[in-house]
């Protein structure tokens, strides 16, 4: 006989004290820390505990007794249900304050090295419709909100086109309007949804792994070029042709209309052939006269305007005079490498993803840059002492690792190479701070500049300049 789960309490009159990790808010009840999503400092709320551990608990606001004076009205009708944009209810100025504090806390608590005054965070403008890439999922069983379930109504039409509920691979929230990308994106998504329903095309069943309409990606470049990539779960030539033809007719402004047939058990398509239905197989971003080709499998920073500001900071911190050999580690499609190449003698880029390296080489050719070279492979395997002996000791290293930070072996090789300057770009100040502590044996931090790439979320980019100790 299964053990009956203990009912967790509803705690009345809880004061939300602060913001916390992962975009949650924080409260204290007796000696227990409680993490609460969608709360604002100053809220008084009745909080239902959902999960309790020894030192903390997780809960949700059952009733907002007295809203914080900080609160603002969220722009999105899906706020509180969709997992994105958890800070919509907080003023943007306060969001920036929280992100500045997040960087400062990481530097003080984790790095524990001498840090100069942290520069004020570079805020985003605009704070809505800033994303150049959105990915939507089609599902035949949309997620029902608690209000819908409590209503007692029947919902026979469960087809959805929207976003996964956090932590649930098979639950998709049907979206009316997302405010993170230009409204054109919503129009395409809604059109495909209605076209599929009108023609009886089955929406994807995420548990059974069957269905025709699976996912859609929309990329909108700063140049005005638009890419739409449809992923179909069945190789039905008649349905594919009808769907793609309808999209092309309805939206002639699409410059790159693509599709892929994906019958795998996951949504990744990096190993699958992408078919160009009409237009070009890529779109182009522009930055200071440089053109960057972005294909369906390419990585490109999802906020084009803030990416430019981020790269400007990285270039300024690099202090290039034109005579330097630069290593760009975790180069991706070579955006930073190509961006700084005109100010350097030579740039060497290294990246794990082979397709990304091909994009990096292509972007150098497109921009007439002949002082770059790129290598693919696991960073800790490629960046060795032998590699540095062969290609030269770098004067400057720019590193932009994934959220997990740098492997210890990579840090060791950097320390052995002793570049005069290191520019560390990070999307995770906590792991960046950990790596700064490792680099402290030979390097001192000379500048810290946070940059907000993702308004209404807790995410923040941070750029740190380091110089070799004399």
Image (tube, rainbow, N blue to C red):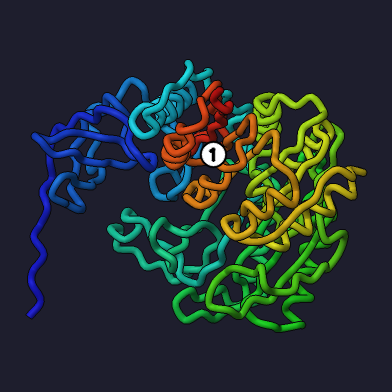
Q: Position of residue 320 (x, y in %)?
A: 75, 27
Q: Residues within 10 Å of mark 1 (few under 14, many from 20)?
A: many
Which residue is at 70% across, 49% downward?
389
Q: Position of residue 240 (x, y in %)?
A: 74, 76
Q: Is residue 293 visible?
A: yes
Q: Nearer the viewer, residue 276 or 464?
A: 464
Q: Position of residue 81 (x, y in %)?
A: 40, 49
Which residue is at 69% across, 24% downward?
316
Q: Nearer the viewer, residue 295 or 254?
A: 295
Left or right, 390 with respect to 401, comes to: right
Which residue is at 42% across, 57% downward?
165
Q: Quadrant of the C terminus?
A: top right
Q: Residue furthest top?
A: 117
Q: Relative to 52, say whether 126 is above or below.
A: above
Q: Secondary structure at mark 1?
A: strand
User: What residue is pinned by disc 1?
Assistant: 426
Q: Nearer the viewer, residue 409 or 48?
A: 409
Left or right, 375 with respect to 442, comes to: right
Q: Position of residue 319 (x, y in %)?
A: 71, 24
Which residue is at 65% across, 61% downward?
377
Toward which corner of the image does residue 306 lie, by quadrant? top right
Left or right, 186 with respect to 159, comes to: right
């Amino acid at each position: 006989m299964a053990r009956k789960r203990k009912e967790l309490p509803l705690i009345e009159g809880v004061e939300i004290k602060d913001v916390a990790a992962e975009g949650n808010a924080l409260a204290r009840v007796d000696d227990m820390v409680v993490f609460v999503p969608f709360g604002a400092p100053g809220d008084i709320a009745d909080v239902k505990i959902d999960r309790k551990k020894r030192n903390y608990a997780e809960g949700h606001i059952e009733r907002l007794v007295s809203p914080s004076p900080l609160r603002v009205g969220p722009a999105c009708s899906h706020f509180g249900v969709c997992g994105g944009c958890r800070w919509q209810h907080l003023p943007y100025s306060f969001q920036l304050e929280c992100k500045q504090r997040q960087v400062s806390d990481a530097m003080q608590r984790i790095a524990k090295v001498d840090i100069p005054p942290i520069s004020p965070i570079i805020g985003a403008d605009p704070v809505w419709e800033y994303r150049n890439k959105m990915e939507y999922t089609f599902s035949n069983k949309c997620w029902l909100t608690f209000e819908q379930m409590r209503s007692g109504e029947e919902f026979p039409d469960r087809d959805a086109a929207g976003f996964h509920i956090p932590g649930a691979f098979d639950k998709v929230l049907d979206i009316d309007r997302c405010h993170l990308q230009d409204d054109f994106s919503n129009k395409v998504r809604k059109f495909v949804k209605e076209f599929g329903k009108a023609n009886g095309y089955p929406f994807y069943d995420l548990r059974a792994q069957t269905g025709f309409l699976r996912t859609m990606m929309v990329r909108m470049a700063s140049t005005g070029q638009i890419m739409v990539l449809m992923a179909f779960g069945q190789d039905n030539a008649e349905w594919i042709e009808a769907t793609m033809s309808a999209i092309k007719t309805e939206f002639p402004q699409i410059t790159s209309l693509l599709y892929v047939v994906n019958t795998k058990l996951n949504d990744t398509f990096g190993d699958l052939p992408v078919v160009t239905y009409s237009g070009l197989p890529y779109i182009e971003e522009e930055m200071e006269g440089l053109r960057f080709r972005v294909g369906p499998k390419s990585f490109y920073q999802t906020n084009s305007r803030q990416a430019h500001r981020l790269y400007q900071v990285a270039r300024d911190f690099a202090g290039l005079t034109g005579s330097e050999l630069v290593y760009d580690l975790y180069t991706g499609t070579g955006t930073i490498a190509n961006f700084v190449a005109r100010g350097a003698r030579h740039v060497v880029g290294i990246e794990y993803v082979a397709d990304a390296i091909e994009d990096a080489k292509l972007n150098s050719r497109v921009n007439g840059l002949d002082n770059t070279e790129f290598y693919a492979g696991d960073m800790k395997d490629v960046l060795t002492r032998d590699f540095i002996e062969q290609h030269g000791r770098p004067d400057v290293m720019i590193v932009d690792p994934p959220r997990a930070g740098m492997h210890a072996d990579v840090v060791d090789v950097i320390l052995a190479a002793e570049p005069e300057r290191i520019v560390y770009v990070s999307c995770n100040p906590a792991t960046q701070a950990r790596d700064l502590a490792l680099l402290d044996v030979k390097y001192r931090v000379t500048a810290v500049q946070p940059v907000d790439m993702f308004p209404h979320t807790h995410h923040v980019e941070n750029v740190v300049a380091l110089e070799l100790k004399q």
